[in-house]
Amino acid sequence: MGMLLMDAQNEAYFKSWYQKLLAALQFCVGKALSDEFSKERKLIKILGDIGEKVKSASDHQRQEVLKKETSRLEEFFQDGNTCHLPLNPALCIKGIDRDACSYFTSNALPLKITFINANPMGKNISIIFKAGDDLRQDMLVLQIIQVMDNIWLREGLDMQMIIYRCLSTGKDQGLVQMVPDAVTLAKIHRHSGLIGPLKENTIKKWFSQHNHLKADYEKVCRFGNFKYFLCSLAGKLKMYPVYSITHNRFLILFTELISP
């Protein structure tokens, strides 16, 4: 809530109202939670600075710049300092895995940052920090998907929707949850060539490349990931008349077998 109110202050017309709401929230929550908000803001500021420096670096220097700048995140977590993840406040983080951090080569050059889970039983948490895209649109789309999926589930219709988290943290910047062992339909189409999206067997061919044994491939197609993909694709088609989700970056497939 606090992060969204801070982001909303970029809207000039409503800025004064959002400032009042944020001040009221900070007054009501008390010092402990207010300090937590401050830590989250500092974390986002550091990520934004790192993203800008990686963008401004030349192609062959970007990975080196990223490794150097992630030392600022290590300093942030010094002396046992922890912070709740703004993308999911239920998760607490205590450091970063520098070797697992990287960046994507798309136009916005988003960062992949892997945090160390403060829960010793939990896995590391990977997120994408994006600067240059208005993630409020993505948030709206994903919220509508969540509402529609809840309606379907209440009616006993499981469309196998996997809805990742997305949070706008400022003007044209934000955090996106990384779904492990998954690849977008857009990436599969890129690897399959110019006319890949028009071929009927593109998806099955991709599944066969990741399941070399015939028994595994047949299991995936009949009961596993391919079945789930078809269900989620049907869900996407049901949503089309409502707000026309046409971008295949919202569709993901899993590289490892999901048991039925």
Image: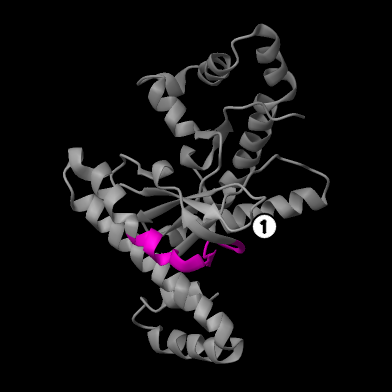
The N terminus appears in which quarter of the rendering? bottom right
Q: Residues within 10 Å of mark 1 (few under 14, many from 20)?
A: few
Q: Position of residue 9 (x, y in %)?
A: 39, 79
Q: Residue at x 39, y 84 (%)?
A: 15
Q: Nearer the viewer, residue 210 or 95?
A: 95
**Residue 214 highlighted magenta (yes or no):** no
Q: Which residue is mark 1?
A: 147
Residue located at (37% from left, 49% from top): 111
Residue drawn at point x = 78 percent, y = 49 percent: 153
Numbered range of the magenta stretch: 72-91
Residue 173 visible in the picture: no
- For the question of whether residue 91 can be seen, the reply is yes
At mark 1, the secondary structure is helix
Specify whether 240 is left or right of 73: right
Q: Is residue 37 above or below residue 110?
A: below
87 is within the stretch colored magenta:
yes
Q: Quadrant of residue 230?
A: top right
Whole-percent x, y for residue 136 in the image: 45, 62
| Near-viewer residue (127 or 243) | 127
129 or 8, which lies in front?
129
Quarter of the image with the C terminus in it: top right
User: Amino acid type of disc 1?
Assistant: Val
Rendered position, 231 above or below 120:
above
Q: Residue furthest left?
A: 58
Query: Horizontal and vertical percent for residue 225?
Result: 66, 27
